[in-house]
Image (cartoon, grey):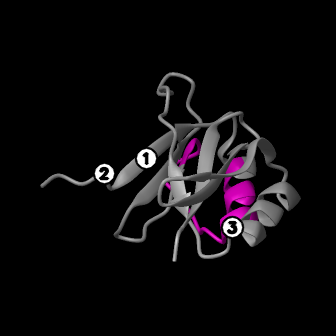
């Protein structure tokens, strides 16, 4: 079966985007040229595309965490804007936020 293993987000500048995700989630990025950076975990990885000629629209990515309240605090502290406060959904709870480039993402914690 095919698995989603990578997500590319268009960004205005890879530097501030890398700083945001590092501060909010502890992610580390490798640079692949002046306008592209990516995580390289070998699992599901994220690419940050700052080249205007290469930008595409992105779907809503969902990030799973163990502590939803701590993640919310980290996102806000890193400069994220909460677009939907914590709410319950079948299987857990989540919130939505916009990163500094305006991308909407969700963070979820599964029910125990």
Residue where numbered disc 3 is placed: 68
Compared to 35, does 68 lie above or below?
below
Q: Earlier in the sequence, mark 1 or mark 3?
A: 1
- Depth check, mark 3 against mark 2: the one in front is 3
Name the residue carrying label 2.
Answer: 4
Q: Quadrant of residue 103?
A: top right
Residue sitting at x 12%, y 55%: 1
Residues marked 1 and 2 touching at CB (< 8 Å): yes
Q: Which residues are magenta?
A: 17-36
Q: Label 1's element? A: strand
Residue in the picture at 76% in, 68% down: 69
Rounded to the nearest angstrom, the CA distance separating label 3 from label 2 is 23 Å
Query: Relative to 13, is 24 above or below?
Result: below
**Residue that label 1 marks:** 7
Point out the tag, 3 or 2, that comes first from the N-terminus: 2
- Between 55 and 92, the residue placed more toward the observer is 92
Image mark count: 3
Please state the horizontal and vertical placement of residue 16, each as a whole percent of the image: 75, 49
């Amino acid at each position: 079966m095919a698995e989603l293993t990578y997500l590319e987000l268009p960004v205005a500048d890879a530097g501030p985007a890398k700083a945001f995700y590092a501060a909010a989630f502890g992610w580390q990025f490798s640079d692949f040229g002046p306008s592209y950076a990516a995580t390289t975990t070998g699992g599901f990885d994220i690419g940050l595309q700052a080249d205007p000629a290469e930008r595409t629209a992105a779907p809503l990515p969902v990030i799973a965490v163990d502590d939803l309240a701590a993640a919310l605090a980290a996102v806000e502290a890193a400069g994220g804007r909460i677009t939907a406060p914590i709410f319950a959904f079948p299987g857990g709870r989540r919130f939505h936020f916009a990163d500094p480039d305006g991308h909407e993402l969700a963070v979820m914690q599964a029910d125990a």
